[in-house]
Amino acid sequence: MIISKDLFLLGDQDYLRLPKDEKRTMVRTTPPKSQRVESALYPCLSVEQQHLPHRPLELVFTNISVSVEKRQILRDVSGMVKPGELLAVMGPSGCGKTTLLNCLAGRIKLDSGCIRLNRERLNKRWKRRICYVLQQDIFFPDLTLRQTLEYTALLRLPDSFSYVQKMQYVDHIIDVLDLRNCQDTIIGDYIKRGLSGGEKKRANIACELLTNPALMLLDEPMSGLDSHAAFNLMALLKRYAEKEGKTIVVTAHQPSSQMFHMFDKLLLLCNGQTAYFGETHKVVDFFNNVGLTLMPHYNPADFIMEQIKGSEEVKEKILAASQEARLSSDYPVELRPNYFSNSICDKYLSNYHTNSLHSIGHLGGEFHRDWSHHFTSPPPPPSSDLCVAISPPHTNENQGHVYTTIAVKEEENKTLWLDDQSHASSSVSSEDDYGWQWPTCFWTQFKVLSRRNFQEARPRMLSTLNWVQTIGLGLMAGLLWFQLPRSEEFLHDIQGWMFFSMTYWMLFAHFGALSSFPSEREVINKERQSGSYRLSAYYLAKMVGELPLTVTLPAVYLLISYPMLGCHEVSTFLTLLSFLLLNTIVAQSVGFFVGACCMDSQVSMTISALYTLATQLFGGYLATNIPPWLKWVQYLSMVHYAYQNMQIVEFSSGDQISCSSQSKFNVCKNSTHIPVEDILNAEGPSLPLWINTIILLLFLVVFRSLGYLVLRYFRTPK
Ligand SMILES: Nc1ncnc2c1ncn2[C@@H]1O[C@H](COP(=O)(O)OP(=O)(O)OP(=O)(O)O)[C@@H](O)[C@H]1O
């Protein structure tokens, strides 16, 4: 069967499963070869729609050393991987594989060394474009796999794609990673069962593949997979790298022999040092030269791992041989000292950028047109190999000749990865070729994140247990304070109901926000690191998305308990409800702020317990004779303001509170009823309703803003 080469990621079976019309569309829209590189992952869309602005990337890291807490984890590690290649980082547990990947993703500060992508030093902009599949699978546990992928697509695919197209991407990736059977299963966690370990791993990769990244770093992608699934996954990554010109780095523990031969390059680590770097197929010869011979029919991966875990003497021999290999002619020129500061190379490149348009124009417009169809920056300069190989006197004539040679080569091969040097000396290239900083606009991010927040938080905030708790408590409070007469004897009970209602919902919201934040922070950090959205969009969406959920249960509680208490007017009920809800939202903001500040949950719990208990003590109900030197604390108590407002509302409407025969209120000497001011003053100085309301709103704004600032400036994901 002949299938369009564009469909390389769809195996024959996948292709056959597609509807007839779609197959035809794919054949019809088969783009020219030079354009296929970006489009093959997304066969359902036209070339223009398929284009994601990702360039092939060459990754070069040299002499990386890293220490953590004064312990050296990596020492002088170098390596490189070109577009279309798969680099495997192997080594025993604890040798520094994950640390190296963290370095390559720009998440760890280096003691020394350099990481370059297309010759440009790794910077913040690049960091956002690297796709890093972590060893841990970090997701919202209550979302299904499909929901997770859909939200990822909606957030990370550009606005130029329609909703339908984004969903087509999701469908396709689900098929490619064979996740259709479990697409409606929740991700789950250690409490709720959901996806299996292998499915989670594939889900993790699927989220990253959606964005069609140029560079993928995968930490232990095969862990938790059976050998068949691991092989399939590796085969997929290999095809992805080869056909799409992607650059892939994976860490692996014990690959099968078949998988091992899929790796183009191998970096073997031993105690944080390079034990081998080079072509995978040459590693056996390398070990042979050290005097360690592979037995016939033995898995080379097992063999080298056994050697590397062997005696100290063997390790020393391997490390010494690896050092020696750096001097051999086989060793990549890019990894040699001073390669990137090579004056010949830099001069060549800067001249290239000055003259590129002219030169390409001179060569004919076909290639340039093809290339600029994909990228807005100038067409690619020569590969790094060529750059070093060329050492002619640098006259303009010679350069003109060089460009001709390269461009002709380019025309023949039509591979896009040769743009590697376009970032090196051009001040415009990397800014211009990705016109956007965020994949989607603020409004899209806000809409999608609000919906996701709502969907993610609903099972947690409106769980069956929470409903039972709310209804049970509403009934209990209603029965306890059932139809209280409005007289001085029962004044304390009415106030008790108000105070209890306020403090209960304050605690509920505060600790709810506090407990949910640590797990959410992980996901947010992961997404922020990949540059999925603005923090401001997330923050605003969190407030808006969770608002209906935050107010539902307190409203239900009041709806049950207040009529039982003796509701007199609907307007009073609604005003009481608004203050109860305002207090609840303020408490949630404080909880969120404390959660954002404290990384340690024990610390955040202690701070929260202190704050909420102090808030209750100084709220005005439990203690009325506060020592003058401590009075200022009550102004920090949000319950104090909300409780006062509830009293103002409740005692200003309906029947006034009647005096008892032995009243403690002076006003009762001349009157039969107690005005609301006297009730409030009996508990200490009070403020008018509008001032209390403004102060509560200020609490809300201040704590929400502080929470944002903490996340923005102090809890920036590294
Ligand atoms: N933040 C840290 N603080 C202290 N030690 C650390 C830290 N990060 C890593 N290490 C140590 O550095 C060494 C390398 O860790 P790393 O996670 O990179 O190993 P690895 O090769 O990926 O291991 P594995 O294959 O088991 O995942 C380990 O000994 C680990 O204990």
Image (cartoon, rainbow, N blue to C red):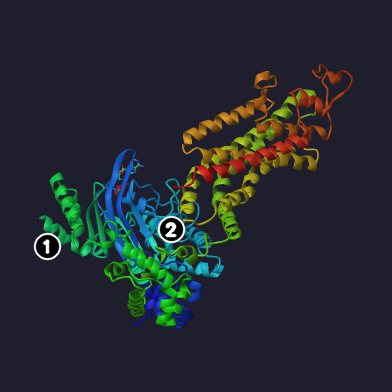
Callout 2 secondary element: helix
Q: 344 or 188: which is nearer to us?
A: 344
- Which residue lies under the disc numbered 1? 296
Q: Quadrant of the N terminus?
A: bottom left
Q: CA distance from mark 2 to mark 1?
A: 44 Å
Front: mark 2 or 1: 2
407 in relation to 655, above or below = below
In the picture, the disc for residue 635 is none
Amino acid found under the numbered disc labelled 1: Pro
Answer with the quarter of the image where residue 499 lies: top right
Disc 1 packing (10 Å; few <14; some 14–19; many ≥20): few
Position of residue 681 measured from the top left corner of the image (x, y, whole percent):
77, 24
Callout 1 secondary element: loop
Position of residue 548 measured from the top left corner of the image (x, y, whole percent):
64, 49
Position of residue 536 measured from the top left corner of the image (x, y, whole percent):
58, 51
Side of 131 where 586 appears, left or right: right
Identify the residue at horizontal 15%, vertical 44% (top origin): 312
Answer with the quarter of the image where residue 497 lies: top right
Q: Does residue 607 appear in this view?
A: yes
Disc 2 packing (10 Å; few <14; some 14–19; many ≥20): some
Ligand 1 sits in quadrant: top left
Side of 356 where 276 appears, left or right: left
Position of residue 572 measured from the top left corner of the image (x, y, whole percent):
78, 39
113 in relation to 671, above or below = below
Q: Quick check: is the Cβ at mark 1 less than 8 Å away from ligand 1?
A: no
Q: Does residue 299 appear in this view?
A: no
Q: 438 or 341: which is nearer to us?
A: 341
Q: 289 or 600: which is nearer to us?
A: 289
Marks 1 and 2: in contact by CB < 8 Å?
A: no
- Which residue lies under the disc numbered 2? 126
